Image: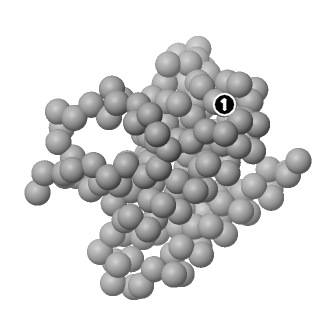
Amino acid sequence: MRTDAEKSAEQQRISLEYQTSTNRRRQQHHGVVVTPTEVTDFIIQSLIHQLKTERGRDPDQGIEWLDPFGGTGIFTARLLQIAPLSPDRKRELAENCIVIEIDPDAAQVCFENLIRVHREETGHEGFVRVLCADTFALDPQYDLWADHYGHPGVIHLPTKH
């Protein structure tokens, strides 16, 4: 079993490799920025603490997690890795996560990353929903949570321009 430090380092490596492989113009156009895992972990731990102390809930208890600018999936991956839940409860948590990423290449890296994280954290095959779309151009009437996209893979959503 890998340590949390090893898992964190892997997420940082995946994000940095993607950023390095992306050309500068695409980085500027799509805002490709790697959030350090220490910052990601602080945000997630703060959210989990707030949920527990102010709402009396754990992160898998009826909470819908949306990452609207997912990149390689570092936020969702770290949520699954550091949430203090059993593997079965992490499976439930993963079912309530959606990642949106505008860049098809990053969306694919994200999907593959989250498959590995899901398998490692839950002991089961599974996936987190990854949608390839421009978050700002999504139809506001479209209910992301109503459709469970019953198959693995990156889902390309139509957007309004």
Quarter holding the C terminus is bottom left
* Direction from residue 148 to residue 74 in the image, left or right: right
Q: Which residue is mark 1?
A: 90
In depth, the one of 151 and 118 nearer the eye is 151
Residue drawn at x 49%, y 36% is 97
Up the image or down, 72 lies above or below 144; here it is below
* Direction from residue 85 to residue 70 in the image, left or right: left
Confirm whether residue 64 shows in the render.
yes
Q: Residues within 10 Å of mark 1 (few under 14, many from 20)?
A: many
Q: Residue furthest right?
A: 1
Residue 7 in the image: state x and y as whole percent.
Answer: 75, 55
Residue 42 in the image: state x and y as whole percent.
Answer: 62, 47
Residue drawn at x 59%, y 75% is 17
Up the image or down, 7 lies above or below 124; here it is below
Give the quarter of the image for residue 149. Answer: top left
Residue 10 in the image: state x and y as whole percent.
Answer: 71, 62
Q: Residue furthest top?
A: 56
Residue drawn at x 18%, y 38% is 140
Give the quarter of the image for residue 11. Answer: bottom right
Q: Residue furthest bottom?
A: 24
